[in-house]
Amino acid sequence: MHVDLSVSWLGLAMANPLYNASGVMCRSVAELEQVRTSAAAAVITKSCTPQPRTGNPEPRYCATALGSINSMGLPNAGYPYYLDYARSYPYAAGKPLFLSLSGMTLQENLDMLSDLAAAQLPCLPEVNLSCPNLPGKPQLGYDFQACHEALTQMARVYHGPFGVKLPPYFDPVHFARMAAVLNAFPALRFVTCINSIGNGLVIDVDRESVVIKPKDGLGGLGGSYVLPTALANVREFYRLLPGKHVVGCGGINSGREAFMHILAGATAVQIGTCLYEEGEGAFARILDELRALMAHKGYQRLDDFRGKLKTL
Ligand code: RRO
């Protein structure tokens, strides 16, 4: 049976629904090119600030049997570096480019968005409202009023389609409140759910120690630890944001989890921890598995099951 994995959204055509999660394999041009020339169907850059940052002290990432913990601290080469990449990007080759922006202040986000608007490039911004690893800085996504204000000002300076990266929410009242904020902005065309679950603690029993240095060991969780939380966020925002797209991110290690995210409503899906651990070969493997699972179930295209999760 022929299985068609293509995705059309935001006026973009993707050969399949997979790309990298921001933060993984996307800090340098060499890494971005690794993703672009892999089986991934799009590319997203590391969240950037106007100036380059070295980030938090190492060790700042650690993988475990169930996923990963990180407190990278927004290491990035600076907005102009990623803008240069976006200027030279071969859009005609059919792999959309997303630029992740994560200013340390609202003004920094406004400055980068204004500049990007002036550049008139076909890349799309994903504004990160959810970095959990900046000591002393709470995640914007957990302050609904501040999100409303930030989005109001961002929509004033950037008129094209854009998206946001959300932190995980854990309460139906919070899903509804955030959805009400997001629904007020028609140019906000997609939300990516989820960023890492903030401020977990992984402990090494042999060493009786934390495993990463920043914040006395606290860091964002990714990988299998977060799959059910990611799926809940995808499904809830899929229901609460009619007309917008949800990009699924969290705990995708195989075609099965990619299928789950799409069944929960994801238009496209991003690979984070698994990509970090396995390298870019993960894309082709996960696509093969997704294709085989769909063929086994008799699904020819993603629309046949997207968002069709059954309840009991
Ligand atoms: O760089 C990081 O520490 C980081 C960021 Br900006 C983010 O959004 N999510 C994450 O897990 N780590």
Image (tube, rainbow, N blue to C red):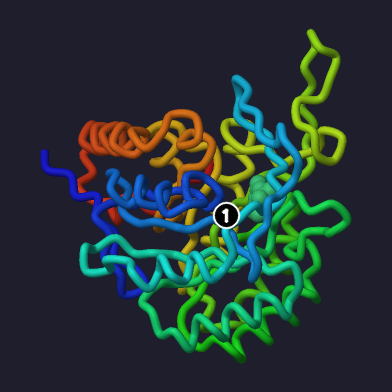
Q: Nearer the viewer, residue 79 or 9?
A: 79
Q: How many discs appear?
A: 1
Of all residues, the one furthest to the bottom in this rendering is 156
Q: Position of residue 190 (x, y in %)?
A: 50, 68
Rendered residue at 60%/29% (across/down): 67
Q: Is residue 295 visible?
A: yes
| Place of residue 219 in the rendered image (x, y in percent of width and height, measured from the top left) | 75, 39
In the rendering, at what x and y percent does residue 160 appear?
46, 84
User: Helix, strand or loop at disc 1?
Assistant: strand
Pick whichever, 257 or 32, lies toward us: 32
Instruction: Residue at 39%, 41% (x, y): give it.
Output: 259
Identity, as a three-letter code, of the amino acid under mark 1: Cys
Q: Quadrant of residue 91?
A: bottom left
Q: Is residue 169 left or right of residue 163?
A: right
Q: Residue furthest left?
A: 1
Which residue is at a point 65% across and 52% down the rendered structure image? Answer: 75
Q: Residue at x 21, y 39 (%)?
A: 298
Quick one: 225 or 174, which is closer to the camera? Answer: 225
Q: Which residue is mark 1?
A: 193
Image position of 14 (left or right of 307): left
What is the crowding at mark 1: few (fewer than 14 residues within 10 Å), some, or many (at least 20)? many
In the image, is residue 14 above or below residue 155?
above
Image vertical order of residue 276 relative to residue 159, above or below: above
Q: Is mark 1 within 8 Å of ligand 1?
A: no
Residue 203, horizontal then vertical, whole percent:
79, 21
Q: Is residue 241 visible?
A: no
Above/below status of 282 relative to 108? above
The N terminus - image quarter: top left
